[in-house]
Image (cartoon, helix red, strand yellow):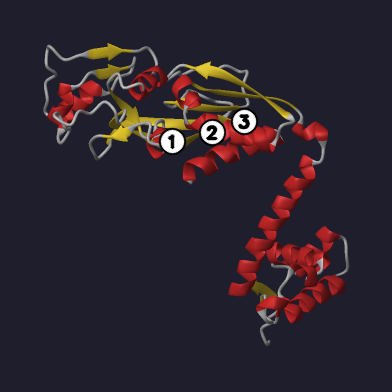
């Protein structure tokens, strides 16, 4: 077949019926099953697929001994068509006020909620203003989760038998501080130099492990500030009160926008992961699925 020019391969020129026929046949690799699914004749379905191949100027199927298999081009087109149909299905669902209205309860630890998760929730609210978001707070490493939530982001793996628990990312810690804290006469060039500055701790402070990895003993005269929660310690660091050992994900935006600076690399990995929790797909509401997808996409990006 002679390939069509790129300009001719536009959606306007491709009939939806032919794309639907191709998707069904490509998914089953069997014309009869696809025809039964679409409730049209075997002949009509085959004609749609042939016309699509002629219009595209490329073979979409290998046809040998009454058996079908997708060509490389067919595989690529099938993925694209299925993705487009999924987007269309979601778009149609958004038109139903009942499927998108109501309250969506999100559970998370306070530090994660005050950091990157708030960015995700803000973007989600702008995209779907008809959904009411309610945030409830979890404690770090909380094993038993409350029943009242749709999507949760947990520090540490909870004990769950009814909902899906998926690892989202592993925490890694770096020493950060406000750029105005470090003095020109006392630069930070190695781990020991941090001891010249106040250190900020939270309830699950990682400083002790960091000292051990760097073969250091804290000075008895070391200045220390103790906070209850990680987000309080991070905020204190942004105010220039000292150095905090923080998870890179929780201070990513502050680092990008210059409110904090990294003092030493590389980050210290810890055996502590953040997990995404929600109902199984057959019980998941559309808003909850969309938020879970937004969270995964944000962390991948």
Mark 2, residues whose alpha carbon is within 10 Å: few (<14), some, or many (≥20)? Answer: some
Reply above or below: 21 against 234.
Answer: below
Q: Pinpoint residue 153: horizontal percent, then vertical percent.
A: 51, 28
Answer whether labels 3 and 1 touch (C-beta < 8 Å).
no
Say which of 48 and 9 sits in front: 9
Answer whether labels 1 and 2 touch (C-beta < 8 Å).
yes
The secondary structure type at the circle numbered 3 is loop
Between the C-alphas of marks 1 and 2, the distance is: 9 Å
Q: Pinpoint residue 108: horizontal percent, then vertical percent.
A: 51, 23
Reading the image, the residue beneath label 3 is 279
The secondary structure type at the circle numbered 2 is helix
Residue 12, visible in the rendered structure: yes
Reply above or below: 156 against 257.
Answer: above
Would you say 243 lies left or right of 192 here? right
Mark 1, residues whose alpha carbon is within 10 Å: few (<14), some, or many (≥20)? Answer: some
**What residue is rendered at 24% in x and 39% in y?**
265
Reading the image, the residue beneath label 2 is 119
Say which of 39 and 222 sits in front: 222
Would you say 114 lies left or right of 84 here? left
**What residue is rendered at 40% in x and 36% in y?**
252
Q: Earlier in the sequence, mark 2 or mark 3?
A: 2
Residue lying at the far front of the rendered structure: 184
Residue 71, visible in the rendered structure: no
Q: Earlier in the sequence, mark 3 or mark 1?
A: 1
Say which of 100 and 45 sits in front: 100
Between the C-alphas of marks 3 and 1, the distance is: 30 Å
Which image quadrant: the N terminus? bottom right
- Tag shown at residue 253: 1
Task: Nearest to the eye among marks 3 and 1: give it.
Answer: 1
Q: Earlier in the sequence, mark 1 or mark 2?
A: 2
Task: Specify the quadrant of the image occupied by residue 163.
Answer: top right
């Amino acid at each position: 077949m002679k390939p069509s020019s790129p300009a001719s391969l536009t959606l306007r020129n491709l009939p939806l019926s032919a794309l639907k026929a191709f998707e069904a046949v490509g998914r089953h690799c069997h014309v009869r099953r696809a025809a039964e699914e679409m409730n049209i004749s075997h002949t009509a379905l085959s004609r749609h697929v042939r016309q699509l191949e002629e219009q595209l100027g490329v073979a979409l199927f290998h046809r040998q001994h009454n058996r079908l298999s997708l060509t490389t081009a067919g595989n690529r087109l099938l993925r694209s068509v299925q993705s487009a149909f999924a987007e269309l299905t979601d778009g149609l669902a958004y038109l139903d006020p009942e499927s998108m209205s109501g309250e969506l309860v999100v559970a998370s630890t306070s530090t994660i909620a005050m950091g990157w998760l708030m960015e995700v929730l803000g973007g989600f609210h702008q995209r779907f203003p008809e959904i009411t978001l309610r945030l409830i707070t979890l404690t770090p490493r909380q094993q038993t989760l409350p029943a009242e939530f749709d999507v949760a982001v947990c520090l540490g793996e909870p004990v769950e038998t009814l909902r899906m628990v998926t690892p989202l990312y592993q925490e890694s810690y770096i020493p950060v501080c406000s750029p105005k804290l470090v003095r020109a006469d006392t630069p930070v060039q190695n781990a020991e130099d941090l001891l010249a500055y106040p250190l900020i701790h939270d309830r699950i402070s990682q400083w002790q492990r960091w000292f051990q990895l760097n073969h250091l003993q804290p000075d008895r005269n070391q200045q220390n500030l103790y906070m209850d929660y990680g987000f309080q310690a991070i905020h204190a660091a942004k105010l220039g009160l000292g150095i905090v050992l923080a998870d890179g994900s929780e201070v990513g935006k502050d680092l990008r926008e210059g409110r904090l600076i990294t003092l030493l690399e590389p980050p210290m990995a810890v055996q502590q992961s953040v997990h995404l929790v929600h109902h199984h797909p057959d019980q998941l509401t559309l808003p909850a699925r969309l938020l879970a997808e937004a969270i995964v996409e944000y962390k991948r990006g």
